[in-house]
Image (cartoon, grey):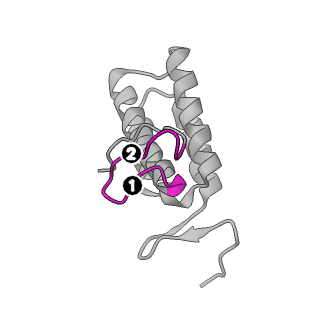
Amino acid sequence: MRAHSAQERVIPGETVVSPRMLFWAFRYALDRQSYVVDDVAKEVARCDELLTGDDRRRMLVEIDEARAADRIGMKCDDASWSHLERVLIATTAAEAGSVGTKGEARSETQTPTVKIGGKP
């Protein structure tokens, strides 16, 4: 068994996942209209905790930009990206401490406002 680089993280019981590869796959799939969109969005959502906060925020910006430029694909593609957005927002908010202990959002004066979607 080979040693893992510092850029790779392992999900127990799964294959080695490179956060960079997740980001590149996301970028490739973002402008596509095929089955790859749903596959990539689901895999990024499954492994979202491996991404840095900056990567998650960048993905959210790029999804918004694609939607604004009408490059989001078909309705089914948009649904896949919307699901990924909810997962990325929830993980980012949890890491930033914008969710209280009982799941309620803290006030804007305590932390920046982040819309929180449910993580399935």
Q: What type is the residue that disc 2 sits on?
A: Ala
- What is the number of callouts on the image? 2
Q: What type is the residue that disc 1 sits on?
A: Gly
Quarter location, residue 86:
top left
Task: Mark 1 and mark 2 in contact? Answer it, CB < 8 Å.
Answer: yes
| Helix, strand or loop for disc 1 | loop
Circle 2 packing at 10 Å, graded few (<14), some (14-19), many (20+), is some
| Helix, strand or loop for disc 2 | loop
Spot occupied by residue 44 in the image (x, y as percentages of width and height): 47, 50
Front residue of 53/20: it is 53
| Residue drawn at x 50%, y 59% as measured from the top left | 49
Spot occupied by residue 115 in the image (x, y as percentages of width and height): 42, 37
Q: Which mark is residue 105?
A: 2
Q: How many angstroms separate mark 1 from mark 2 (CA)? A: 6 Å
Spot occupied by residue 78 in the image (x, y as percentages of width and height): 39, 27
Quarter location, residue 50:
bottom right
| Residue drawn at x 39%, y 29% as measured from the top left | 77
Outermost residue on the right side: it is 6
Q: Which mark is residue 70?
A: none
Q: Give yes or no for residue 76 being in the magenta stretch.
A: no
Spot occupied by residue 85 in the image (x, y as percentages of width and height): 44, 38
Front residue of 64/35: it is 64
Q: Give yes or no for residue 98 being in the magenta stretch.
A: yes
Outermost residue on the bottom side: it is 1
Is 111 above or below relative to 15? above
Magenta-colored span: 95-111
| Residue drawn at x 42%, y 48% as measured from the top left | 90
Give the residue number, with chain letter if any, for mark 1. Answer: 100
| Residue drawn at x 44%, y 22% as measured from the top left | 73
Is 1 above or below relative to 33? below
Please indicate, yes or no, whether residue 6 appears anywhere in the rendered image: yes
